[in-house]
Amino acid sequence: MSAVHPPSSESVLAPGHTYASVTDKILGLVLRRPTPLWLTCLALSAALLALLGIAITWLLYRGVGIWGINIPVAWGFAITNFVWWIGIGHAGTFISAFLLLLKQEWRTSINRFAEAMTIFAVMCAGMFPLLHLGRPWFFYWLLPYPNVMWLWPQFRSPLVWDVFAVSTYFTISVVFWYVGLIPDLAALRDGTTRWGRRVVYGTLALGWRGSAAHWQRYHKAYMLLAGLAAPLVISVHSVVGMDFSGGIVPGWHSTIFPPYFVGGAIFSGFAMVVTLAVPLRYFFGLQDFITIKHLSNCAKLMIVTGSIVAYGYMMEAFMAWYSDDRYEAYMMADRALGHYGWAFWCLIACNVCTPQLYWIRRVRETPWITFLLSLVIQFGMWMERFVIVVQSLHRDYPPSKWEMYYPTVWDVATLLGSIGLFCTLFYLFVRYFPVIAVSELRELVKEKAPEGSAPVGV
């Protein structure tokens, strides 16, 4: 066997592990002291988070005029970032809910940090529509609170649709993630020697003792939440797609947007899973748990979802021609050959051409290559949202309202700051919570044990 095809690539979990080895390896990452590398990475992400704080403070003081938005490009980086972050959050729920219901055991090693990724990505996404309101202190107008005149909320507004979809998605994702954590929190409670941590983990564990009754109720609740979360994978980004479909802007007014957006969201979400999985397995020595098989399966799913995205691009071009609508035809020609043509061909190269490399087994099973390609795909998906938002708006129906969009330093600062927020939350999660579901991995150890042998360890 070469280095590209290690023995672990053929199994979900590397052989030779026991209950004790799985528990000690993963919980040890939380119970030991932080490494200098972790502290350095946390400091860098905190610096970007501070940049986000500065950008938001200046935005609230001066208004959205500090951004590059104008008329007709009233949506700029803010909505581009919103759609991009929502898409990244899709893979976590897909892995946790759909693959759990389909009994795909390879999800076990990646579902915990993928669920955390979902929560943090939705948190990053949720702030952008609020900042884009112009008067964010009136955000409660989007909520269905009782009022005498029935003026708010305006249910025909896509902003209200987003509030319902994103808040529901975030709530179910948090509850699903937390319920899955309870057995591991109890293990941390029993394994730590520090009084403060024991109190915190014990409180969060909700009195878990590992009895048969506890496990029975846990599995019922977990499967029920998976059944609730699975439809949300489809619904939440379909609602985001209908934000665009509800407008009469050429390039937006299309029924293909909801499924097209869902496919693209899962595509970019799995790219982020690979982006996080490769450094985790390398820096924390988790090669036995996050195996080559996991990276290969994620790459295969990116081939499928990338094909859906490519089909959406082709259908946009086909319908612009087949509809015989001159505005749609002009939009498509301007998208490929106009001022933002460079962005269009960039997203084609990143989202259509790059995933084809995953057909090559050597590429799929070489971690650093899958990592680099996942970064390229994430960049391409951000460019796709930029083209949809900006290019479709910058040429309005009357030529007198044609205008170019140029991002300002505050647009870039807000984007980088949101990445800093995501990284900071993820580094804290890795430090204080088990990055892999210990209880689920121990079940795999039990299932894979030879017949007649008892698992070793407690």
Image (spheres, helix red, strand yellow):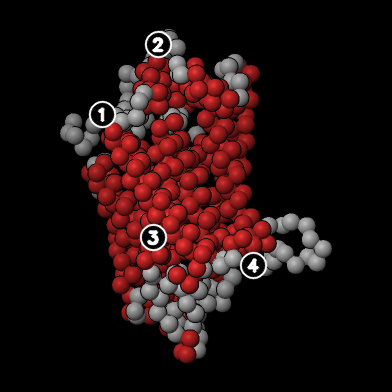
Q: How crowded is the residue under tag 2: few (<14 C-alpha within 10 Å), some, or many (20+)?
A: few
Kindly identify the residue that appears in the image at 32 percent across and 22 percent down: 15
Label 2 element class: loop
Label 3 element class: helix
Label 1 element class: helix
Label 4 element class: loop
| Any part of residue 110 in sight | no
CB under 8 Å between discs 1 and 3:
no
| Any part of residue 418 in sight | yes
Instruction: State which tag comes first along the sequence, 1 or 3.
Output: 1
Residue 10 percent coordinates (x, y): 31, 31
Residue 157: give its label. Answer: 4
CB under 8 Å between discs 2 and 3:
no
Q: Compared with residue 176, is residue 89 higher up or lower down, i.e. above or below? A: below
Q: How far apart are the two marked residues, 1 and 3, measured between alpha carbons?
A: 44 Å
Q: Say which residue label 1 marks.
A: 7
Q: Say which residue label 2 marks.
A: 456
Residue 384: give its label. Answer: none
Q: Amino acid at mark 1?
A: Pro
In the foreground, 385 or 319:
385
Q: How far apart are the two marked residues, 1 and 4, measured between alpha carbons?
A: 54 Å
Image quadrant where one finds the N terminus? top left
Kindly identify the residue that appears in the image at 70 percent across and 63 percent down: 153
Q: How far apart are the two marked residues, 3 and 4, measured between alpha carbons?
A: 29 Å
> Which marked residue is nearer to the observer: mark 1 or mark 3?
3
Q: Amino acid at mark 3?
A: Ala
Q: How far apart are the two marked residues, 2 and 3, measured between alpha carbons?
A: 52 Å
Q: Say which residue label 3 marks.
A: 413
